[in-house]
Structure formats: structure tokens, C-alpha cells
Image (cartoon, grey):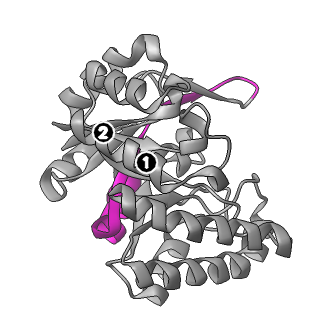
Amino acid sequence: MKIGVRAHDYGRFTVAELAALLRREGYDAAQLALPKVFTGVDSYAVIDGRLIESIRQEFDRQKIEIAVFGCYMDLANPDREIRRKAVETFCACLKWAKELGARVIGTETAYARLSGDDRKAWRPDMLDSIWRILEAANRIDMTVALEPVYWHPLTGLEEVQELLRQAQDKTHLKLIFDPANLLELPEATDQDAYWRKWLGAVGEWIEIFHIKDFTVSPAGEYVPRLLGEGVIRYKPIAAWIKANRPDSCLIREEMAPAEAQKDIRFLKEMFC
């Protein structure tokens, strides 16, 4: 089991500064969205081989696995030009993720918070983008990890299973499993049964687990919390991971740097 973090939750750093910081904090792995975490990298377009090699060397030296090359794109947007640029950027980053030695290159399927009707209406464009991306991933033998989110076109278990059935590619298509992004109605959901259903159905495709916690304010707003202080029941998820995927990588998201050690202790006690 490896414990990692979404690195840009700490801010922006040079490559050497970030790798050293993550090692000091006690992480084994990281999710890197290069334009969000490295100073001087303002977009995916400025990434070059020299930058990739410097990241690879520094993270190897600090023994930090790059678990996820973050390239979150608006893959289902019905605006043709927006979607074309999203697919083009993602496909260009496949090469950089491969050279970096990342376990996966990860994305959700949209940016917007969509209504049920729009999720369904955007799904054909989502599928078209995914097939284009998988074709490119196959050419260079890189693994793509998609993250289902209940307000996106890749919205629920049924849609995920249908996508995996159509893709028929366990080598180049995996999942990022984020319980907080799948729990639409915390108070009305039997989480033990819900997580067992998800993990039993698609667990073998999950490569990365995003770990965060939250509560819902009286106004219905999402409020990030320390792990174990929100609504997510991690016990059944941890039990499944220990029994079935002890080689998994856990990526803490929405981490507050001042409280990082509390979260790391929670992860070690719950999952390891």
C-alpha cells in the first residue's frame, strides 16, 4: 500500500523543492498536475523533455512514485472546439506521462456540474473522446484512468460498467475511485452496501483511490473535512482494499498542509 497526495494542495514549488517536501512529510506517492504544482509551468503546452527528466530524477531520488499524471480535461463538452482541444491536450500528455513513468494519466469526464438530462446528453461526446484517447494510449502503451463523478457524464456504476464492457481493454483503461464524488445522498445511502456493490463490480479496474472527506452544510454546500471527521464510511472500503488490492495507491485530496500528519496517521491506521 502506498500513501500519496495531490501535490498542488501544498502549493507551487520547484521540482526539487516539491520532491523533498513530499519525502519529509512521509508520502510514498504523488498525483502531479504539472501546471498547478510547479513554478514556471503555466500550461501543459510548455512541458518539454528536460522538465520531465528533471521531475523523474528528483522523484526517483526521493523515492516518491508518480502515481497519477493529472490531466483533467473537459472531455464531454458538446462544444466541438473545446472538446477537440481537450482531447488534443490529453493525447499530447500521454507521451509525457509515459516518459515520466507515471502509473496512470488521470482525468474526470467534464468540468461542469451537470443536470441528469445533460449528463445523458453529453455522454456520446464523452465516449467519442475516450475512444480517441484510448487509441492513442494503445499506440504508446500508456494507461488512462477515468474518474467517475455523480454529476458528470460518467456518472454511476451502470455507466461505468457499460463503458468498461465496450472498451474491452483492462491494460490501458483503469479507474480512479473517489468515494466523495460518488456519494450524492450521504444521509439516505447505506454506505456499507453501496461501496461493496461498487467494489465488487469494478474493483479490479481501480488503480487509484482518492481519499477525502466532507460534510454538508445547512445550506447544502460541500465542506471539506479531515479524514474520519466527515460522512464517508471508509471501513468497508479499507477492508476490501486490504483483502483484494493491497498494492493500491491512496491519494489524499483536499489536504490542509497544517493537518497533513493527522490525515497520514488516519490512512495508515485505517488502510495499512
- Residue 147 showing in the rendered view: no
> Circle 2 is placed at which residue position?
59
* Residue 11, percent from left and from top: 55, 24
> Circle 1 is placed at which residue position?
190
Q: Residues within 10 Å of mark 1 (few under 14, many from 20)?
A: few
Q: Which of labels 2 and 1 is toward the front? A: 2
Q: Residues within 10 Å of mark 2 (few under 14, many from 20)?
A: many
Residue 227 position by quadrant: top left
Residue 266 position by quadrant: top left
The answer to whether residue 272 is above or below residue 185 is above
Q: In the image, 221: left or right of 5?
A: right
Q: Secondary structure at mark 2?
A: helix
Identify which residue, 234 or 218, lies in the foreground: 234
Residue shown at 57% from the left, 71% from the top = 91
Q: Quadrant of the N terminus?
A: top left
Q: Identify the magenta region.
A: 193-219
